[in-house]
Amino acid sequence: MISLQNQIILITGASSGIGTACAKIFAGAGAKLILAARRLERLQQLTEELKKEFETEVYLLQLDVRDRAAVESAISNLPTAWSEIDILINNAGLSRGLDKLHEGSFQDWEEMIDTNIKGLLYLTRYVVPGMVKRDRGHVVNVGSIAGHQAYPGGNVYCGTKAAVRLISEGLKQDLLGTSVRVTSVDPGMVETEFSDVRFHGDTERAKKVYQGVTPLTPDDVADVILFCTTRSPHVNINEVILMPVDQA
Ligand code: NDP
């Protein structure tokens, strides 16, 4: 197991769910955190908690990952002390609706594609060159079981997560010959704000998603990400699928 003490970890989507859980577990491991999301107040509140509990050093980025120019500016303007990112966790993502493809909303499709695929690509494109230069680093992409199996109404979301898997595989191939590692972490159902976002705040409908299943917790996923990023430097865990026991 390698130490994460003073390693710089950039987590997108840190304002909620899996991203927040990652922030806490990596803070507990002694890492320095760059936390990114659009909701700055959430990030500020989390920072206070992390500073109090772990004395974590935190740098905040209020960032919409869909905005390529903003991503470029955020990464290129990081203060020197924060510029050498050791681990990038591409976690920001969402699903919208559960509509049949032929009845789907163009706006929902664009939001999913722009966030889940293009946002992840932008962060990767701007962060990985530094990793290659230093010959050190790890990119963790949060995919989904939805990238392995489609379900009714999942169409575009499943497509975006299938893309994340293949992008991870492609990046791994591109980085052969360097020490930079790439992992896709693909969970089944996790209880977060994901379902509320999917149904545009319809909490009743969101709750029904978990009926009959004991979902994963965000901590379960963060724990796996911590495991993947602390293996010996010659070990690359390419992909992990983690599922609730009672989810098919
Ligand atoms: P949450 O809704 O709890 O968190 C999503 C995070 O993504 C928030 O922090 C949100 O921050 C951020 N985000 C969304 N859009 C943007 C954007 N345009 N720019 C920057 N940040 C953005 O959901 P989860 O924690 O569950 O989701 C995290 C990841 O896990 C996603 O990629 C999701 O697809 C994946 N996943 C989730 C599963 C589940 O069942 N929950 C199952 C499998 C995978 P803000 O709104 O402040 O910008």
Image (tube, rainbow, N blue to C red):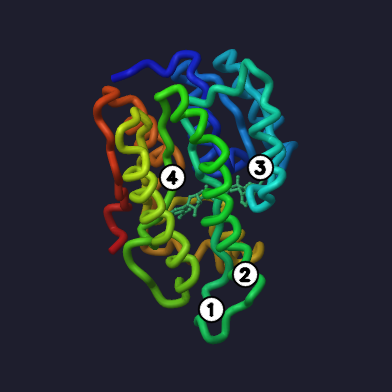
Comparing labels 1 and 4, the label whose residue is closer to the camera: 4
Q: Which residue is disc 4 drawn over?
A: 141
- Residue 127 relative to residue 150: left or right: right
Closer to the camera: disc 4 or disc 3?
A: 3
Q: Earlier in the sequence, mark 4 or mark 3?
A: 3
Residue 165 placement: quadrant = bottom left
Question: How many labels, in total?
Answer: 4
Query: Whole-Å distance between the Cαs marked 4 and 3?
Result: 17 Å
Circle 3 sits on which residue? Answer: 71
Mark 1: amino acid? Asp
Say if mark 2 contacts mark 1, CB within 8 Å. yes
> Up-down: is 165 above or below 78?
below
Q: The N terminus appears in which quarter of the rendering?
A: top left
Label 4 crowd (10 A; few <14 / some 14-19 / many >=20): many
Three-letter amino acid code of the residue under disc 4: Asn
What is the x, y in percent for residue 114? 60, 59
- Residue 217: give x, y in percent of width and height: 43, 44
Label placed on residue 108: 2
- Measuring 30% from the left and 45% from the top, which residue is drawn there? 240
Camera-side residue of 212 and 185: 185
